[in-house]
Image: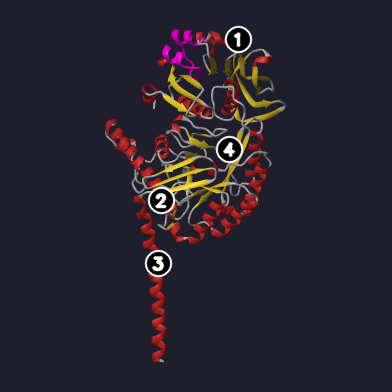
Amino acid sequence: MMFGLLISPTITQAQEISSEKVLIIQSGEEQQSMKEQKILEIILGQYDVTSETILDTMMTKEKIKSASAIIYLGIEKKQLSKELIEELNTFSGKFYAIGHNMEQIPRMSWLNLEGEVLIQHLVFSEKEQALPEERIIYKINVQLDEIQQVAMTTDGTRIPLIAKQANNYYFAAETLSNPFGTILAESFQSFFNKQPTGFVRYLRLEDIHPKVDAKQLREQAKFLKEKEIPYMVAVIPVYTNENGETIHFSDVPELVETLKYMQKNGASIVLHGYRHQYRESETGEGFEFWDVENDRPIYQKGSEKAKQRTDFATEKDYQQFINEGEAFERKYITAAIENGVAELVTQGIYPLAFEAPHYAMSQQGYEVVSRHFSTYIGRIQISDETYKSEYQPSNASRPAFLHGMTVYPETIGFVEQNNEQSLQLMKNQVTNLMNYQEAYISAFYHPYLGIDGLKDVVDILGEVDAPWLDLKAANNQVTTSTIKLSSEKGQIQVEKLLFERKHEKKEKMKRIVIYGIILVGIVGSVLVFIIRRKTS
């Protein structure tokens, strides 16, 4: 990862035409610094900017001159070079500094740093929002008219979190993990001179696989149709379990008809993996694109014993295994997407976006998905170190490491079975997000929990005065080796290439065999009946 950052700077293109060229100068080379960089990329992906990230040691005068704005990301405490200090101080454009090393930059001397302090709350007018845990920020002393955002210390003292003077901004936190990332994203409205777009709601029905109860799903679809709510349906084409049971949608025509009904009446289909499992777990429970038992990317077949570093005599041999594993992962994800899209389209179901099971996927995985989908749904894994490292922006975003994909984030969670507090937690998150000027208020729901729980979620989302996201109304592109799908203004275009015919032929042959067996059974029964009558 470090090699990639040094050799090939990150380019973020939020729109094809951009009015801002942002240079991110980063101090910090550890894994945590890379996570913070990813979060910043996601935040910037919400804006009409093109950005490039470089390490502070790689700064050049040419890079500085080409930028209309600079963001300094001080993740690591260190001594900055004299050249960097001089270039930052003489830069005439907008400047946003985050975290450490401000005392070394003369243009930020107005901050009056007074050490570090623990905070417990954010303050919005007269409202307070508790942080998930205590956070460390720099204590700064500035004039009141320079303060953009206030925090509250453990003893109840209010101190600045974001401050500005002229075209210089400062964010006093040492991490961008939420809710700090959401606060920074809102601060960028002023920095980039952008008007807030308000709130957007979305609802997603999750884990719809071939063993789902079609009648229960139809009931919920009718309810959402009556409410005139557009929504998404995360679909898994194949159900399997540890006992070897395998069911495809072609085996459950009633469920297919229900999905078509949903697609016709407000639903947009999301491909939620192919089997939603990797080793021997049940579909919907297991991970598919992350080896959760070893907390690493998919390097081998699920049926194989996972190889570890101790299985190799040398580091060179182990690195060879990793290289081969990365090649395997690319083929594995590509096959899942190709098969998943083909099986759905053969049934008349048209996926417009992709969602990784449990939101778990490697950075290479996102690159593979981006070759096939323009739209991604949910939260984003920001490290290959662990699937537990994830982030969701407050708004739709197009970060660099999603390679052109737009992510529509899930922000308020879901109804958890046997957790009576989950609805209240969702309500609390809505309340927190409403402190901002724009955000997605988005949730998902598992239909097996029944119609009453769905109504509860709709009621929570109904408290927000905002439009619903209709994915079909957006411009989505899906491309495989055999199929092209696109949507715009509520219409879906389907183009089947010549090679796709094999899937249709397979389905036709399957139907012929089934109908043949039924016909043989009927004929056999009639012959037996006739023979018995003659013999009697």
Q: Residue at horizontal 67%, vertical 12%?
A: 143
> Residue 3 location, x and y as percent?
36, 24
Q: Which mark is residue 342?
A: 2
Tag shown at residue 110: 1
Residue 333's label in the rendered image is none
Query: For the residue marked with disc 2, what is the amino acid?
Result: Ala
Q: How many marks?
A: 4
Q: Percent position (x, y) of residue 500?
A: 37, 51
Graded by Cα atoms within 10 Å as few (under 14), some (14 to 19) or many (20 or more), the crowding at tag 3 reads few
Mark positioned earlier in the residue sequence (3 or 4): 4
Report the amino acid beneath label 3. Ile
What label sits on residue 514 in the rendered view? 3
Which region is colored magenta? Answer: 60-89
Q: What element does badge 3 sit on?
A: helix
Mark 2–mark 1 contact, CB under 8 Å? Answer: no
Say if the magenta span includes residue 352: no
| Cα distance in 3D space between marks 4 and 1 | 36 Å
Identify the image quadrant of residue 287.
Answer: top left
Residue that numbered label 4 is attached to = 411
